[in-house]
Amino acid sequence: MNAKPKCSDPVILNLWHAIVAFAELRPNTVYETVLLEEPVSFAIDSAQTPVAWRSQPAYRAGDTVDPARVADRLLTLSAYGYVWICLGTPAADIFPIPEYFEAKRRNLNAATIGVHVSAPRAIENFLDMGHFPYVHTNILGAEPHTEVKEYEVEITPDGNEVVATRCRFYQPKASAASTEGGDIEYVYRVPHPYCSVLYKTSHVDTARLDVIGIFIQPIDQEHIRAHMLLCLVDEDNDDVAIRRFQLTIFGQDKPILENQFPRRLPLDPRAETPIRADKSSVAYRRWLAQKGVTYGVIPAAT
Amino acid sequence: MSENAASRWHPIAAAHDVPYRHVFHGQLLGREFAVWRADDGFVNVWENRCLHRGVRLSIGINDGRELKCQYHGWRYSNRSAGCTYIPAHPADAPARTITIRTYPVAERYGFIWSCLDPVTEMPDIAALDQKDLVLLRGISVNAPADWVIERLKTYQFWPTNALGEAAAETVVEGSDEFCVTLRSSRNGAQTRAVLLVQPVDAGRSVIRGALDAAPAGKERIAVLRHHNERLSALRDEVERQAAAQPAPIPIEPVYQPVTPELAAMPERAPPGRNAALRVVVARKWRAGEGVAGFELRAVDGYLPTFQPGAHIDVHLPNGQVRQYSIVNAPGETASYVIGVKREPDSKGGSQCLHEAVQEGDVLAISEPRNNFPLRRNATRTIFIAGGIGITPLLAMALALHHSRFAYELHYFSRSRDHFAFPERLGVLGDNLKPHVNLSPETTEARIRELLAVRRPRMQVYVCGPGPMLDVARRIAAEHGWSDSEVRFEYFRNTRKLDDSTGFEVALSRSCITLAVSPGQSILAALRERGIAIPSSCEQGACGTCIATVLEGEPDHQDVYLNDAEKRGGSRIITCVSRAKSARLILDL
């Protein structure tokens, strides 16, 4: 039962990883997925309590199951509308997103999308503003407003998060109410090597911030499922419209990510050519190297 | 795969796979290529990876002159593969060394050829050396090249003029590791087929074939179908064989690391007023009244990448050094084009170029430098050119025109005959606004009209004679334009220089203190102590020799810095400016 894990990176193995949104699940039904190259099965009971185990022939996807009767369970956790599991020994609690619990917010899983790329490449793309005019043309950016203005990046004193602040980028339609473009402000957090949370000026109430979380499930070193959590101030648009918008955005990123080589994120500074706009990705890469992450990256030669 | 494979030239595409404005995804021995044809016909074979974030350039946009990466819009120039623009930082000229790895290319016999590790030029292939070749469709095979070659030696086909007849005889005329030449004959009808196998990866190949007989119309289609059917059957057979064996491990592509300088944000160009390049005057012509056009081609290799607004130093046969803006449009990289106005009061620079320099002459020039970079993040750009000041602005206007940005080029000149480069101006259409034969007063009034309405996200570039620039500068200030919205380029510093002072300069980084005596420039004093600092015009106009002031009060005598920069006192143009304080501390 305790076979040697396929992932030999203890940092990644000991983390919690989101594998599915509760909203996608029917109770007492077996589902399957893959995490860190291990086939994993899971189910929830009628009280929404998750149970997960390494896949075995006795339980096939779609089977009806009484989760309480499954033996040899994996560690599970419920957070932010997702089932999280850990294949190693959890080193820390799940990171906080206080806004999730605020009143008058819409929380929903916008989408879960498979992408042929490593988890860190997807996180880096999530942190990047420079591609807005080119990849999300006329939505999140538009030529000629291509400048990435100076912003701040720091690693929190406890070393647990990379935080980028004072990020501003020109957006063609700054808010739902406005017809003019203008600068939108962003804050990015990377509280987990494979997860990131962004805060951006709300379309509806410019005094408040929408929150978007991306939780990457590593299938293997070069395949992921990206789970997108929305935590919005928006009360006007329906779920379908909101999901369609986020799917459009992610659908534009996917072909770019799948054409990025090497697929694993290179941590050697000389592998690629950073510019000042890439301060946050430079900090993220250094942070991964300092943590000793080796899964999904190409470590720098020492 | 044999060691010869890397040093051998292979076909990587059919010529018709590379039409204009398209990017073809090629691969050879595990390396991916972005293959694209510029509007001037040149075929570029590049490593298929943007140097910024590794995105394939084969999904980029070929605009005919440059290849633009889909991810962040970085632009790379035809031929040289140098980066010309980084949209995230519109005010910075990209470091010239950001250059995609290129591979050699030959377009012959209907194919595009390349080589990973060339030791020779593309050799002639006698069997293909004729006019009427019929190219077969490229057939991809999931099998190693040597398996495909072995099987092709037994390929049987009918001669082109005897399709469908029984028992044609096909014999091997010649073969090597990647090529089989076959001849099929029956009753006097003969066809030769040259079948090349492109080793795509350890376990993947493409068969590229050519026939020596070229039938037309329906017959041609019948011949193509004949080979397509037979080669497809052959493919299936080889693939079945290959599938029974363990798949060869794909060749791991090797990505060269970027230089340590590029691993950090690139800064300024390397120092020196040296003439690193040798060019031939390929063409000299009358580009307008009193203006000579020069087309300068590299003596060997490619010319370095330039950006709109860049200039070169031309080292003249008479020993003088003069600066000229590059007029070229984006991607026009086979040569640099400059325009030289004959100056009546010339010290001999323009006269030398007009009279002494002829087509075929070799000139020494510097690499292009850009102290007048074009920002492309404004919604509207106004160019105001006076006389020969058209040259940098024409390059800028062509760049914006090509990218379909909104702009106007106002050209002030004595007459239409005085317009330089009319054929290039013609490209701009209605965006060109001529202002001819105006008095200084009317000129001032026109400039006042142009600068009267200031809108956000609008920018203005002005280049022309000193008095016109002074007027434009004054009007811009009156209308509240900031220094970042209006940029000026003087081609000469006409101010009277005062070099009567003596003072001390301390260099904070080098821990050196030196005395600058009357009559000597800071630049000259630095050079005397062996400190290399780049320079170009050496008269306070171009900005190349700029330095940062840490302490002390500069005595600005240049025309490069704007008023705010001069008031700020943190920058100094070392070729002409001096010190009001007894001591200056520079960040050198």
Image: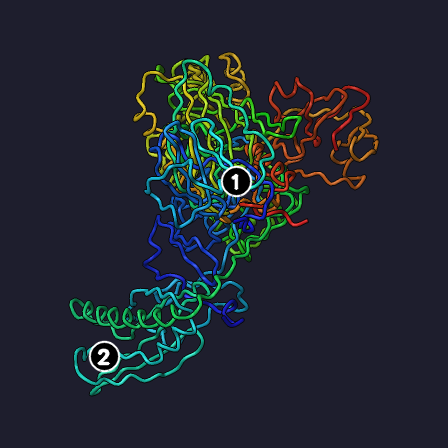
Q: Are marks 2 and 1 in contact (CB under 8 Å)?
A: no
Q: Residues within 10 Å of mark 1 (few under 14, many from 20)?
A: many
Question: What's the residue at 32%, 65% (across, down)?
Answer: B139
Q: Amino acid at mark 1?
A: Pro
Residue picked out by circle 1: A120
SS at mark 1 in the image: helix
Question: What's the residue at 41%, 64% (across, down)?
Answer: B204
Placement of B35 over or under B314, stated as above or below: below
Give the number of callouts: 2
Question: What's the residue at 22%, 83% (across, down)?
Answer: B189
The quadrant of the rendering that contains the C terminus of chain B is top right
Residue B31 in picture, x, y percent from top left: 48, 58
Q: Which mark is residue B293?
A: none
Residue picked out by circle 2: B158
Question: Quick one: B171 or A206, which is closer to the camera?
Answer: A206
- Which chain does tag 2 point to? B
Question: Left or right: B246 with respect to B556?
Answer: left
Q: Amino acid at mark 2?
A: Trp
Q: Are marks 2 and 1 on the same chain?
A: no
**Res B473 quadrant in image:** top right
SS at mark 2 in the image: loop
Residue B240 in picture, x, y percent from top left: 34, 70
Q: Residues within 10 Å of mark 2 (few under 14, many from 20)?
A: many
CA gap between label 2 and label 1 equals 56 Å
